[in-house]
Amino acid sequence: MKMQIPLILVFMCGVAMLAQFMIPHEYSEDFFQYANDFVIVIGILALPVGIYSLMSNTVRKAQRDPKERPFALVTIGAYVIMIIGGMKAEWFFSPTSLSTRFFDNILIPAQATLFSMLAFYIASAAYRAFRARTALAAVLLVTAFVVMLRLIPLPEPIATWNNGLVRWILEVPNMAAKRAIVMGVALGGITYSTKILLGIERAYMGGE
């Protein structure tokens, strides 16, 4: 029964949501809105479980490995500070909340630093990938060169011709490849969802 009941519930909920998508009726739309609200409530109830799991794993890791203790202290301290910072701004006699200050003065600069380092990594990866060792690599190299030329102020009529060529590359071959990828992802999602509804895929229940 421990396996059958979750499988039956998943199947019934999946069929109900599929039927809701196919039925253009007011009751169907209300059911969809109610289901979304139910998902939000479940997410809120799951938040304490996630916080407990994070804190317990952090403390356990710090106890096992002394090298992890500084990182554990930073994680726990940041968690406590962000909870305090999320309280009302007037409690701190400030026009802006403490959490906003942390986002503006710590998180955003850290993200900018990370992305600036990522730019150098992408440049080095592009240099390695654009080596014209084969015919396809040569096509990729030429196409990338043409697309990057759009960012350079070129004289007329070269700029107009290059912009038209770049527009054609983005709207015809690039768009065709993107649509093929999206179709493949959609078919994969449909297949995976069908396996879940039929009980073939049971990884969400803790199995393999």
Image: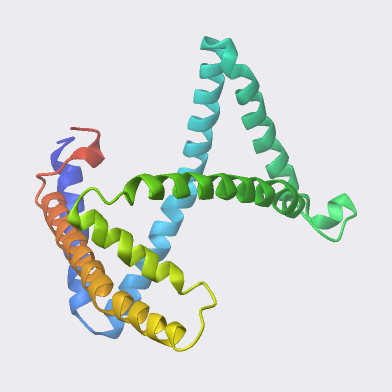
Q: Quadrant of residue 161?
A: bottom left
Q: Is 3 located above or below residue 197 in the figure?
A: above
Q: Position of residue 21 (x, y in %)?
A: 22, 74
Q: Position of 12 compared to 159: left or right?
A: left
Q: For the C terminus, give its image quadrant.
A: top left
Residue 165, placed above or below residue 93: below
Q: Position of residue 131 (x, y in %)?
A: 31, 49
How many marks can you see? 0
Outermost residue to the right: 93
112 or 165, which lies in front? 165
Figure colour scheme:
rainbow
For the point 71% across and 46% down, which residue is it? 106
Which residue is depicted at the point 37% across and 70% down?
Answer: 146
Please give the name of the residue rendered at 16% of the width and 46% of the height, measured from the top-left corner: 7
Specify whether 97 is left or right of 42: right
Residue pictured at 30% horizontal, 81% vertical: 168
**Residue 62 percent location from the top left of the image:** 57, 16
In the rendered image, the quadrant that contains the N terminus is: top left
Q: Position of residue 196 (x, y in %)?
A: 16, 50
Q: Is residue 96 left or right of residue 154?
A: right
For residue 11, side relative to residue 41 (left or right): left
The foreground one among 41 and 83 is 83
